[in-house]
Image: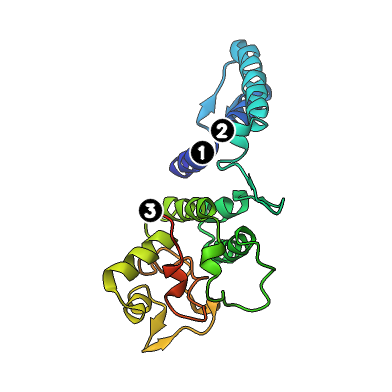
Amino acid sequence: MWDNIINTLGKMPIPNVLIWAGLLFILLTFVSRIGGVIEVRSNRKRWTLSIGLLLLSIGIVLSFSPIFNQSLTPRTLPSGSLLNLKQLETYLKNEDFQNANQETGILLRKSANLPPPTKKRFEKGDSQKINCQDLKLIDTLWKKYSNNKFGISIQKNILLDTQSWDRLVQKVGWKQNNKLLEDRSQLTYNLSAPRGHLPGVLFWITDDSNFYDGISCNF
């Protein structure tokens, strides 16, 4: 049980850890023992309250700090819209790769100033419209939360190595039983998927590898 608690705390942002620690100390002011493990003597309870209030206050203040409020600052696009990567990062951090995949498609279209998708495919030349910095930030998040297993740059490098669109889709698992996957629901949304399998928003395109050929970013 305690191992699970420690692992959970280790994944929390620092402000959240301080807030929970503060609440724990405050709770110890009113009870003598928690879980038969943590025990505070009555003559030390005044210190637990003071420490608890201090930690709670610091945690709340830091939670409103831009440094901890989000890992990547939204960038204002020429159109005036905001490319906010916070939701994508939340999905990836929780290994919710299906929603992360959908969010990636939305963000790429925003970056390219394209209208909301009315169909699943990007069109030929769309990759040239995507802001390079946006693409690199999205790619960085995918690689960070998949231990460098998923990412757009990984897919492009596989294509460069294989020099074949057909070999790429086979290697990343977009083609099974010699048949290209027909729907995003057929993708594997976990870390057991082949390297480069996600994000899977780019292979429903009109002209095969031209999407990746249009990506001029140096990842």
How far apart, in angstroms, are the residues tagged by discs 3 and 1? 20 Å
- Which of pointers 3 and 1 lies earlier in the amino acid sequence? 1
Label 1: element kind: helix
Asked whether disc 2 touches disc 1, contact meaning CB atoms under 8 Å apart, the reply is: yes
Coordinates of residue 113 in the picture (x, y in percent): 65, 62
Q: Nearer the viewer, residue 127 or 96?
A: 127
Label 2 packing within 10 angstroms: few (<14), some (14-19), many (20+): some
| Residue type for callout 2 | Val
* CA separation in Å, label 3 and label 2: 24 Å
The mark found on residue 9 in the picture is 1
Q: Hey, which quadrant is residue 41 in on the image?
A: top right
In the rendered image, the vertical position of residue 39 relative to residue 93, given as above or below: above
Callout 3 touching callout 2 (CB < 8 Å): no
Which mark sits nearer the N-terminus, 3 or 2? 2
C-alpha gap between disc 2 and disc 1: 6 Å
For numbered disc 3, what is the local secondary structure? loop
Residue occupying the point 54% across, 40% down: 12
How many numbered tags mark residues here?
3
Query: Horizontally, is 142 left or right of 159 in the view?
Result: right
**Residue 158 or residue 29, whichever sits in front:** 158
Which numbered circle lies on residue 153?
none
